[in-house]
Structures are given as C-alpha cells and as structure tokens.
Amino acid sequence: MLTGAGISAESGVPTFRDSDGLWEGHRPEDVATPEAFDADRGLVQRFYDERRAALARVEPNAAHRALADLEAELGDDLLLITQNIDDLHERAGSQRVHHMHGELRAAWCRACDVRIPWERSLADEPPCPGCGIAGLRPDVVWFGEMPYGMDEIHRALFSCDLFVSIGTSGVVYPAAAFVDYAIAGGSETLELNLERASNSDFHVSRQGPATELVPAWVAELTTAEATA
Ligand code: BJW
C-alpha cells in the first residue's frame, strides 16, 4: 500500500501538484532539494515550520481511519508506505507506517547524523541536543536524496499479492515505479485517486475522493475475507 498527498487533501493538507498546491509559487522540483536549502535556508526552514505548525489544525479523515481499521484486520500482512510527511496515518491509529520521504515531526542533525523527534521551530537554528551544533534540518527526503527503507520496500513489492496506490500523482520516483515492481513480482494492482495518475499501469483504477473510495474498498475487502 502506497499513499500520497491526495489521502490528506480532504483533511486540509495541500497537495504538491494540484492547482493550489504550489510551494510559494515554486515547483517542488525546484525547491525540495538540498541545493535550495543551502541557497536559502531561512525560506526552507520557515516553510517546514509552517507546515509542522499546521499539523495541529488538521485531523485524520475517513480514508486514514479506514486504513487503520484494515491494519487492525491484517496486522503484519499490510505494509503501509507513505510519501507523506504528516502524521495523519498514525493519528488515525495506524501503527506500522513507513515514511519513505521522512517526517515533519523529526529533525536530522547534519553535524552528528542523529535523527530526533522535533516539534518546535527550526528557523531560529536551535542547537542539536546531541552535539550542540546548529546543524538541524527537517528530516525529510528531497530530490537527489535516497528515500528511507528502500530494501524493505523492494522486498515487499516483489512479494505482495496486492499493491494499492492512493492519492499520488505518479510523477516522483522511485515511488512512481512501485506499480511496475509489483506487477513484475506477480501482484494485482489497484489505484484509488481523484484522477488517474500518470503511471497508469494499474490493473484497476477507480476515480473519486479518497474519503469515499478508501472506506468503500476496505469494506469490500474485509467482507470478502470474512466470507472466504
Ligand atoms: C486526491 C485527492 C482526493 C487530490 N482524493 N486523491 C528523471 C526520470 C526519473 C527520475 C528522475 C529523473 N530525474 C530525477 C529523478 C529522480 C527524482 C524524481 O522523481 N524526479 C521527478 C520530478 C522526475 N527522485 C528523487 O530524487 C528521489 N530520490 C531518488 O530517486 O534517489 C535515488 C534512488 C535510486 C534508486 C532507488 C531509490 C532511490 C527523492 C524524491 C523526494 C521527493 N520529495 C518530496 C518532498 C518531501 C518533503 C515534503 O513533503 O516537503 O516528496 S517532493 C513531493 O512529491 C513530496 C511527495 O511525497 C512527492 C509525491 O507527491 P504526491 O504525493 O504524488 O502528490 P502530488 O501533489 O503530486 O499528487 C497528488 C495526487 O492526489 C494527485 O494524483 C491527485 O489527483 C490526488 N488527489 N486530492 C484522492 N481528495
């Protein structure tokens, strides 16, 4: 299972590539890079500070909750990989969430290479609690950086029975290629999205808002499992 910005859209978290989702007028490809951070650290730190603070004003929606219910049924048979850096899956009750692009509520010290939970601002360049150096950045994955946990993800993709992609545009790699890896491994594939993604190799694609499609699909699946 892969989720993207679309699953959090109805909670009020802006997506990246929808009409109102631009990064202060920039394409994410131009600013979500370590080079952009080095060029204008204040801008990037403020942007993430604002998004971290905004988490307090949003709530998980019916799609997040349905996936938490599904995890309660399937346990370790469900691997929930999210590209999102918000914590709405966890707040809905999911316990095994793999944040491949990092998390807003975490910081990474570039000086001592530790990753720590972080709730406050980073724009004022606070010292790292570990080494005391002001080297903290958001613990998120920018273009040109390696997403987290790719070995585990690849193993799961090549061995799963069903790969489901929810609310992601399919333009950012490596996540955009997951459907192809799953198909290569013999999996069925399903897309749930407002609009078809650009990597539309899925066996089945359903269009609509996540808060409708995801609970309906989870209900179908759990009913089918109960009667099997
Ligand atoms: C709804 C809805 C509703 C709306 N209900 N649905 C040339 C070719 C191929 C690859 C490359 C290339 N040049 C460079 C690359 C690699 C590059 C890349 O992909 N570039 C592309 C732009 C071409 N990738 C990387 O650099 C990655 N690293 C990497 O590749 O390392 C090497 C490697 C090699 C081999 C294996 C593994 C690794 C790193 C990518 C990091 C992306 N980082 C960001 C920022 C994270 C921090 C932050 O959040 O600020 O991640 S960018 C941004 O895009 C963010 C997202 O996670 C990511 C994906 O966005 P997402 O979730 O798809 O959102 P949107 O807005 O695009 O789409 C929303 C979707 O929701 C739409 O489909 C709507 O229809 C839908 N929707 N409302 C249901 N209510």
Image (cartoon, rainbow, N blue to C red):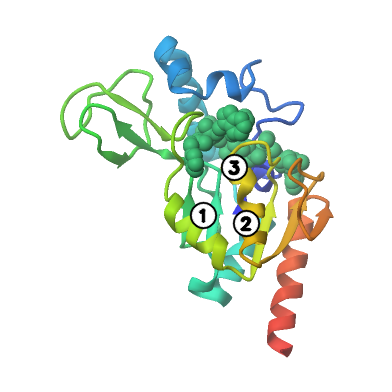
Coordinates of residue 164 in the picture (x, y in percent) = 67, 59
**Residue at 83% across / 51% down in the picture?**
208
Q: Is residue 15 left or right of residue 202?
A: left
Please name which of the two marks, 2 or 1, marks the residue nearer to the observer. 2
Residue neighbourhood size for the residue with mark 1, other residues' Cα within 10 Å, grouped as few (<14), some (14–19), many (≥20): some
Q: Is residue 66 above or below residue 26?
A: below
Q: Looking at the image, is mark 2 or mark 3 earlier in the sequence? A: 3
Figure quadrant of the N terminus = bottom right
Q: Does any portion of residue 55 appear in the rendered image?
A: yes
Q: Looking at the image, is mark 1 or mark 3 earlier in the sequence? A: 3
Residue 58 — which label? 3
**Residue at 80% across / 46% down in the picture?**
194
**Residue kind at label 2, given as amino acid type:** His
Q: Is residue 26 above or below residue 79?
A: above
Q: Which residue is mark 1?
A: 91
Q: Does any portion of residue 101 appear in the rendered image?
A: no
Which quadrant holds residue 120? top left
Coordinates of residue 184 in the picture (x, y in percent) = 64, 60
Residue neighbourhood size for the residue with mark 3, other residues' Cα within 10 Å, grouped as few (<14), some (14–19), many (≥20): some
Q: Which residue is mark 2?
A: 64
- In this view, the residue farthest toward the top is 39
Q: Are marks 2 and 1 in contact (CB under 8 Å)?
A: yes
* SS state under label 2: helix
Coordinates of residue 20 in the picture (x, y in percent) = 73, 26
Q: Nearer the viewer, residue 191 or 61?
A: 191
**Residue kind at label 3, given as amino acid type:** Val
Figure quadrant of the C terminus = bottom right
Q: Are marks 1 and 3 in contact (CB under 8 Å)?
A: no
